[in-house]
Amino acid sequence: MTTAHSDSPSAGRRLFAVLALLATAALVVEAFTFIVSNLVWLVVLLAGLALAVAGVWWVLTERLPRRAIGIAGLIAGAVIIVVALMQAVGDSQRPLLRIAIVFATLAVAAMAGRAALTPDLRELDRLRRDGRARPRKPVLLCNPWSGGGKVAKFGLLDIAKEMGVETVLLDHGLDLAQLARDAIARGADCLGMAGGDGSQALVASIANEHDLPFVCISAGTRNHFAQDLGFDKEDPRKGMTAFRDGVERFIDFATVGDRLFVNNVSLGIYATIVQQDSYRDAKLETSRNLLPEMLGSQAEPFDLQFTTPDGAEVADSFLIMVSNNPYILGPSLDVSQRRSMDTGTLGVFAVNAASGHEAAAVVTRTALGVGGRDPHLHQFTAETFEVRSRSGKAFAGVDGEALELDTPLEFRSHPRALRMLVPVDVLVEAERRRSRGFSPGALFGIALGRPSAALAGAERMEAAGEAAHR
């Protein structure tokens, strides 16, 4: 293997890293000065935030007329926060100038940091060139109803025909897994799926069984898997180039028992909601009707137990989510997304509490980024994980599919075990996604001339590709 990717970052990236660190230091100084001079208004702001949080979980857990009290609390809290901010800034000299300087410094820190952490496109040239693969007999399975009919809307059948890709349409009464296996029996050397996340996971599992590359076409409703891989989730046509000029990429998948999943498995509240017949056609209405019952003051915890990595036994769980690679949680521009798909770990997020009200409060505080070290909140990564229940059964939402599974549930991460073909721009976007998290350590490393974590990720993908072909 060559050492092309071990080169030090360019002088431009090192300069951007230094600039980002200096801008961040300036923001810290500004924040400290602001806090010292505005302690009273900061206390008022925190009170408003607490009122807003209380209002949010009353909205979630109560029915009218008590839900109206929650709405009023949310509005009042928001007003207090705005007033406190205006008064704090207004007390300073030249408030508008001060605000402009803060936002300008923040913009410099963000843009310079992103430029420093994102590898230059030329640094990925060799990986893109050497990793290209073109299947001889690719097959694309299509769910014509998924995403409100995206297969027809975007003309995927015509595009596939022009590219020489065989298409197989899922119809009522047909078994998607059997269709995939039949395609392999006819000689398919690559499987693609145009559909939702559940269908993606199923076809990917069959491709993995036969050591075939898999192509993801974002023709579902939400397309979480495609999004976190770096695809344009709104336009499935862009993914079709993977059949003709794709780059091999190896990502993680996870299993619960012997079932593969690419996004997550939810237990507790969400898993119970998706079991309802009305959920598929009326998701918001079904959730709104059931949440007050499951999170109200009389709601009891679900029959779910687990052990944390440090050995603590946790029971009375209202919610457990196990994801294939950890999600970003809390206030963030990419909340509920994954910045990397090859960490080799599961992401675990769980809430246990004595009552539904308590659980709702924990979830709400976490969503607002003020959960802190709440003893009822459990968030960690692990290579394996087990969930138990006294009944021996548990409802589960596996990549959005409603199931009832036998317990204990054994979860496991399979590092870089799924072989995929992706378009060149998706590979580049995947590396950019890695750089979204602000990391002073990474910036210091680049400023000192060390290769970035994103480039190390590119090396890992190349190494995995070489190992797979030995």
Image: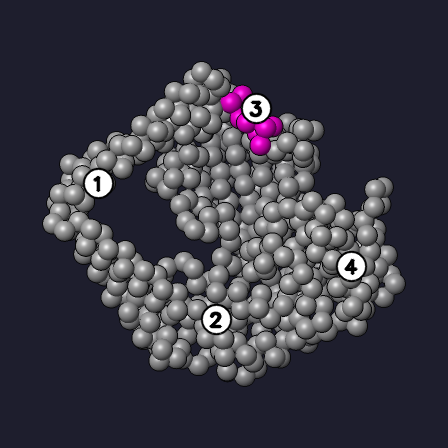
Which mark is on residue 157? 4
Point out the tag, 4 or 1, that comes first from the N-terminus: 1
- The reply to whether the magenta stretch includes residue 288 is yes
Which mark is on residue 86? 1
* Residue 382 visible to an observer of this rendering: no
User: For the residue marked with disc 4, what is the amino acid?
Assistant: Leu
- The reply to whether the magenta stretch includes residue 322 is no
Q: State the image coordinates of residue 306 (x, y, percent, origin top left).
A: 53, 37
User: Where does label 3 land, which residue?
Assistant: 289
Q: Quadrant of the C terminus?
A: bottom right
Are the two marked residues, 3 and 4, in contact with CB atoms closer than 8 angstroms?
A: no
Point out the tag, 4 or 2, that comes first from the N-terminus: 4
Q: Secondary structure at mark 2?
A: helix
Q: Is residue 81 above or below residue 385?
A: above
Q: Residue at x 82, y 56 (%)?
A: 168
Q: Secondary structure at mark 1?
A: helix
Are the two marked residues, 1 and 2, in contact with CB atoms closer than 8 angstroms?
A: no
Separation of disc 3 and disc 4 at Cα? 40 Å
